[in-house]
Image: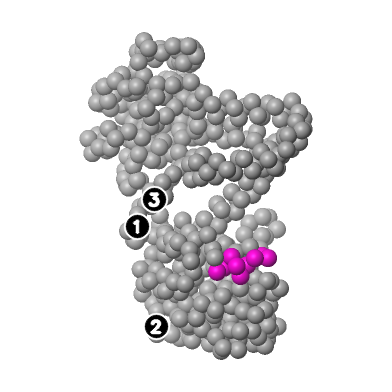
């Protein structure tokens, strides 16, 4: 494959050398002559392990050259990677000036070409940039997106210091595209990279890098806060976190990563509060651990706001316990939502076939007596009776018996807190608490059919 790389800094230099190693012919482009001269002398523009030999070897084999002439680079390649910097502006926003300048230059190059050209954004950019880059290229080239060219999002996951190793062995290869042609080309480009090839929607790919890096930052801060608490208790924090990491079922695993409703039950609220209070008593500042409960409360408020936004007063709650298959109501987050709506004068009906009020005992009975003393008047084990009497149906547990509710009750609003449904039209009567339907994504009006979720989590 003939590939041009715009921006010969860390990401561009490593990408150029590694793509040449993978058998592609690469033309590097940089607006400063110095970096171009280095590559053309067989030398890297950065200092990194293994990069010197890779650039030297690629240059000697005639697989790597560099230029400041962007038109020449576009004309002589099929794919252009954008690897220019995306610094923060003074007010903290991302400065995309370099990206847009390169997009214009590539557009000018495409104007002079007859064959289909693929542009891949490798730099770290916010969702929406792919669409904007496409618009700039359309304007500069006078050509049509997905007819004459396309723009793919292909975020870079390398870390400085181990960049060549990371490039050749990434955790995944990620492509966001609405072009089947581009997907096929990228499968070919990366065919020798030993990583799962994930092809997804453009905006999903665009946000991934930010989600990954923010989670990595969260891991570091969480480990440090745990360490600071342990230190005050003369506990070896490294032993604690080592054992923590051995639990691959619940701790280091896909479990608990589904966007949805607030957590509840008898353990998570109680135990996270206990750790928070312990830190407070030890005078250890733990802002991340402290904010967990606040975030959980916000999710309950979000559920209330979504239900209120439907503008209908008869609300049916499908599932009262904190998770499916139990009658444990202690700290069930939906109970707080019901309490708030009841206080605002909403007419509430509740369906839960696991909850038998007469059989509730101990703290379970005490909790519900304190929160919803009138529960016996509004709870039912008749799903249809609750649905018929309600205008808004709030699904709080995943149950097979809810699967055909949209078909059976098309005039009801459905508020989904657990992703019971995937593909309902967002414009209609359905709203998920923490996800948008792909059909409402203006950047991708014809998404390629793909499996939604293959990972069990
Ligand atoms: N460095 C990393 O570890 C890393 C890892 C993953 C992703 N990223 C992302 O990749 C992007 C690039 O990062 P970097 O560290 O390689 O930046 P960098 O500053 O090292 O390199 C950017 C290069 O682009 C060149 N450039 C600017 N405008 C140009 C133009 N119009 N034409 C041609 N070249 C131009 C600059 O001269 C420079 O050589 C950023 O968005 C960054 O966030 C970086």
Q: Is residue 429 one of those drawn in magenta?
A: no
Q: Quadrant of the C terminus?
A: top left
| Residue 32 visible somewhere in the drawing | no
Q: Residues within 10 Å of mark 3 (few under 14, many from 20)?
A: few
Q: Position of residue 22 (x, y in %)?
A: 51, 77
Query: Which label number is shown at residue 450?
Result: 1
- Residue highlighted by disc 3: 453
Q: Residue furthest left?
A: 408
Magenta part of the protein: which range? 160-168
| Residue at 22%, 35% in the rendered image | 408
| Residue at 46%, 42% in the rendered image | 258
- Residue highlighted by disc 2: 115
| Residue 219 visible somewhere in the drawing | yes
User: Which one is nearer the viewer's eye here, 124 or 164?
Assistant: 164
| Residue at 57%, 62% in the rendered image | 157
Left or right: 217, with 103 as reference point: right
Q: Is residue 161 one of those drawn in magenta?
A: yes
Dot 1 or dot 2, earlier in sequence: 2
């Amino acid at each position: 494959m003939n590939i041009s790389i715009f921006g010969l800094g860390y990401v561009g230099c490593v990408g150029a050398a590694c793509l040449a190693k993978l058998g592609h012919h690469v033309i590097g482009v940089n607006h400063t002559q110095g970096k171009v001269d280095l590559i053309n002398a067989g030398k890297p523009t950065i200092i990194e392990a293994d990069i010197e030999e890779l650039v030297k070897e690629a240059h000697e084999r005639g697989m790597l050259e560099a230029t400041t002439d962007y038109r020449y680079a576009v004309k002589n390649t099929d794919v252009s990677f954008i690897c220019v910097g995306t610094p923060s502006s003074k007010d903290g926003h991302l400065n995309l000036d370099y990206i847009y300048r390169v997009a214009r230059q590539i557009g000018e190059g495409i104007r002079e070409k007859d064959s289909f050209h693929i542009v891949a954004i490798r730099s770290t950019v916010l969702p929406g940039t792919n669409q904007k880059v496409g618009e700039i290229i359309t304007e500069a080239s006078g050509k049509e997106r997905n007819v004459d060219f396309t723009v793919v999002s292909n975020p870079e996951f390398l870390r400085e210091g181990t960049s060549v190793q990371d490039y050749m062995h990434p955790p995944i290869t990620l492509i966001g595209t609405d072009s089947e042609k581009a997907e096929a080309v990228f499968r070919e480009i990366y065919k020798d990279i030993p990583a799962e090839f994930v092809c997804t929607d453009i905006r999903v790919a665009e946000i991934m890098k930010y989600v990954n890096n923010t989670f990595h930052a969260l891991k570091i801060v969480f480990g440090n806060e745990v360490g600071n608490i342990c230190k005050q208790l003369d506990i070896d924090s490294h032993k604690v976190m080592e054992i923590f990491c051995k639990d691959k079922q619940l701790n280091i695993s896909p479990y608990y990563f589904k966007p949805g409703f607030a957590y509840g039950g008898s353990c998570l609220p109680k135990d996270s509060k206990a750790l928070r209070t312990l830190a407070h008593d030890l005078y250890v500042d733990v802002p991340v651990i402290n904010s967990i409960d606040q975030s959980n409360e916000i999710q309950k408020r979000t559920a209330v706001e979504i239900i209120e936004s439907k503008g209908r007063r008869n609300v049916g709650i499908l599932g009262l316990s904190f998770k499916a298959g139990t009658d444990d109501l202690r700290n069930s987050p939906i109970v707080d939502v019901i309490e708030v709506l009841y206080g605002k004068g909403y007419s509430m009906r509740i369906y839960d076939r696991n909850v038998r009020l007469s059989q509730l005992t101990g703290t379970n009975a005490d909790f519900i007596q304190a929160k919803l003393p009138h529960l016996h008047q509004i709870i039912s084990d008749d799903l249809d009776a609750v649905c018929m009497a309600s205008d808004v149906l709030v699904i709080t547990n995943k149950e097979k018996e809810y699967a055909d509710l949209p078909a059976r009750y098309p005039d009801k609003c459905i508020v989904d807190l657990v992703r019971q449904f995937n593909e309902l039209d967002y414009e209609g009567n359905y709203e998920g608490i923490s996800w948008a339907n792909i059909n409402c994504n203006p950047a991708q009006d014809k998404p390629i059919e793909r499996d939604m979720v293959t990972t069990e989590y």
